[in-house]
Amino acid sequence: MRDPSKSPHPDLVPLNEAPLESADRTEIMSALFESFVTQQGSLGLSLLGDLPSEGGEEDRGVDVESAKLVIDQLEMFEFKTRGNLSPEEAAFLRKTLTLLGEALFRRVGPEAGA
């Protein structure tokens, strides 16, 4: 198992593999799916300045275009996986996209959808 304190990206929490030792492939894939969506969501929020950075408030950089790309990629992922996700996975992905969309709207206003 990886040690989170040694991560070069402290905002990213690695997958806790201990509970998965006796898991079947479906459970492992679901955990990896959740971890992936969480990481992408955190990246998007970080790019929008919604997550504190290691350097503190004044160090928060905002990159709206990159955040839009993360959102676009998650929307593509949602589209391409439609019908193949469990209801819980689909809801988690939709919730993450909603949170990112709201953060983008707060950052740039109505032109966020453009």
Image: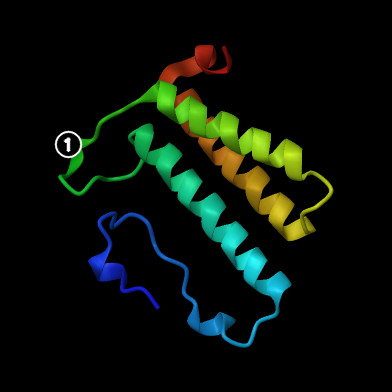
Find residue 44 and report its image quarter.
top left
Question: Picture coordinates of residue 10 (x, y %)?
Answer: 28, 58
- Left or right, 96 with respect to 63, comes to right
Residue lying furthest right: 83
Residue lying furthest bottom: 22
Question: Picture coordinates of residue 29 (x, y %)?
Answer: 65, 65
Q: Look at the image and tell me in which quarter the N terminus lies.
A: bottom left
Q: 102 or 7, which lies in front?
A: 7
Residue pointed to by mark 1:
59
Q: Is residue 107 positioned above or below 40 on the image? A: above
Q: 52 or 67, which lies in front?
A: 67
Q: Residue at x 46, y 74 (%)?
A: 16
Count numbered badges in the picture.
1
Q: Look at the image and tell me in which quarter the C terminus lies.
A: top right
Q: How is the image coloured?
A: rainbow
**Residue type of the residue flagged with mark 1:** Asp
Q: Residue at x 55, y 32 (%)?
A: 71
Q: 80 or 19, which lies in front?
A: 80
- Left or right, 55 with respect to 96, comes to left
Find residue 51 and report its image quarter.
top left
Find residue 96 and report its image quarter.
top right
Crowding near the residue tagged with mark 1, few <14, some 14–19, many ≥20 C-alpha atoms within 10 Å: few
Question: Picture coordinates of residue 20 (x, y %)?
Answer: 58, 80
Mark 1, secondary structure of its residue: helix
Q: Residue at x 56, y 50 (%)?
A: 37
